[in-house]
Image (spheres, grey):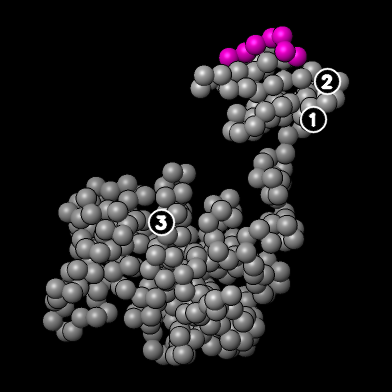
């Protein structure tokens, strides 16, 4: 197996806040890594300390104990952020909305500029490359106030890319976005991690999307440490259920649990998406669904010339699920 390249290493790290005469420790004794080419999703209940850990990894907040290593170089709070190693996208709304997109993305090049604050040809190319990677070249001359929330989030990711760091940290990048934009952002970050060989860490509440896109999960909630692993292992172990105490949602199937309130069994046969949505419609309407072979009313889900049909007991034919349900109910 090819060894992974650790771009960030946490060694005996404890984070939180120093109070007069005491410490508020949020996480302690962390021994973790962020690896090149991987998307890591950092999850946990509200208020557990996800934003605090991200600020600590970025060098914006001093650890209580331990060290953060970026490559072979320890991060020291006295040095401030590590702008050549880590770029950060926080949850703050964009305030300078009169600026155009290219101007904001060019801010990612400021750590490399001298006192003259002049973009070199190389800086300009990095900005253009970042816009292209995020597929927003067409927005380059737009003012920020003209953009949707989803477009503004893409601009902030492009700014982080223009900074040209091996590590990108993002705090709730899909907050305030609709489903389509949330999916787009998560897929984009997954692609960028692989294509550009970056280590990308996202603090997120998007459980369903994280399970489908993340290479690794950092899960907070067990004391002051983190449980880590690939999404599938954590689902099967039951640790997500322990942390989030999911109410009415079956994480192993990815479905909301429906009550079979009709006390009526239906035998169902078929395949593909039509079968899955048929089963969902039946269970949502209070039926219990079983496999073929039982002596219950039997429904076949069949494809006929590109159209779906539902057949009850090889006798009654239905062209929509709504008419089928009306007949059954």
> Are circles 1 and 2 on residues that touch, CB within 8 Å?
yes
**Is 162 or 62 nearer to us in this picture?**
162
**Is 135 or 46 nearer to us in this picture?**
135
Left or right of 218? Residue 155 is left
Q: Estimate the x, y position of residue 221 in percent, counting from the top left.
A: 68, 66
Residue range of the region highlighted in magenta in the rendering: 313-321
Indicate yes or no whether the magenta region holds residue 287: no
Q: Estimate the x, y position of residue 90 in percent, counting from the top left.
A: 41, 65
Q: Quadrant of residue 14?
A: bottom right
Cα–Cα gap, marks 2 and 3: 47 Å
Looking at the rendered image, the disc whose residue lies closer to the viewer, 3 or 1, is 1
Indicate yes or no whether the magenta region holds residue 320: yes
Cα–Cα gap, marks 3 and 1: 39 Å
The 10 Å Cα crowd at callout 2, few under 14, some 14 to 19, many 20 or more, is: some
Quarter of the figure that contains the N terminus? bottom right
**Is 232 placed above or below 321 here?**
below
């Amino acid at each position: 197996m090819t060894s992974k390249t650790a771009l960030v290493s946490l060694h005996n790290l404890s984070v939180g806040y120093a109070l007069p005469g005491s410490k508020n420790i949020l996480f302690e004794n962390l021994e973790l890594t962020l690896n090149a080419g991987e998307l890591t999703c950092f999850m946990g209940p509200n208020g557990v300390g996800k934003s605090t850990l991200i600020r600590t990894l970025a060098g914006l907040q001093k650890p209580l104990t331990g060290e953060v290593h970026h490559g072979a170089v320890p991060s020291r709070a006295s040095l401030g952020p590590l702008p050549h190693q880590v770029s950060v996208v926080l949850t703050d709304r964009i305030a300078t909305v009169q600026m155009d997109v290219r101007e904001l993305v060019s801010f990612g090049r400021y750590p490399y500029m001298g006192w003259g604050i002049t973009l070199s040809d190389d800086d300009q190319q990095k900005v253009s490359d970042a816009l292209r990677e995020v597929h927003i070249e067409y927005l380059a001359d737009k003012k920020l106030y003209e953009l949707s929330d989803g477009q503004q989030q893409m601009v902030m990711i492009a700014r982080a890319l223009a900074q040209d760091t091996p590590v990108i940290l993002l705090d709730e990048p899909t907050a305030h976005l609709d489903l389509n934009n949330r999916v787009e952002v998560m897929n984009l970050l997954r692609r960028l991690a692989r294509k550009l060989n970056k280590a990308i860490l996202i603090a997120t509440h998007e459980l369903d999307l994280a399970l489908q896109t993340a290479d690794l999960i950092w899960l907070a909630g067990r004391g002051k440490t983190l449980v880590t692993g690939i999404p599938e292992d954590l689902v099967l172990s039951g640790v997500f259920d322990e942390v989030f105490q999911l109410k009415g949602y079956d994480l192993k199937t990815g479905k909301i649990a429906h009550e079979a309130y009709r006390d009526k069994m239906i035998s169902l046969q078929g395949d593909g998406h039509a079968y899955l949505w048929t089963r969902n419609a039946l269970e949502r309407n209070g039926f219990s669904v079983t496999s073929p072979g039982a002596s219950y009313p039997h429904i076949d889900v069949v494809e006929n010339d590109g159209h779906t049909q539902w057949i009850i007991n090889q006798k009654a034919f239905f062209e929509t699920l709504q008419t089928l349900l009306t007949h059954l109910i």
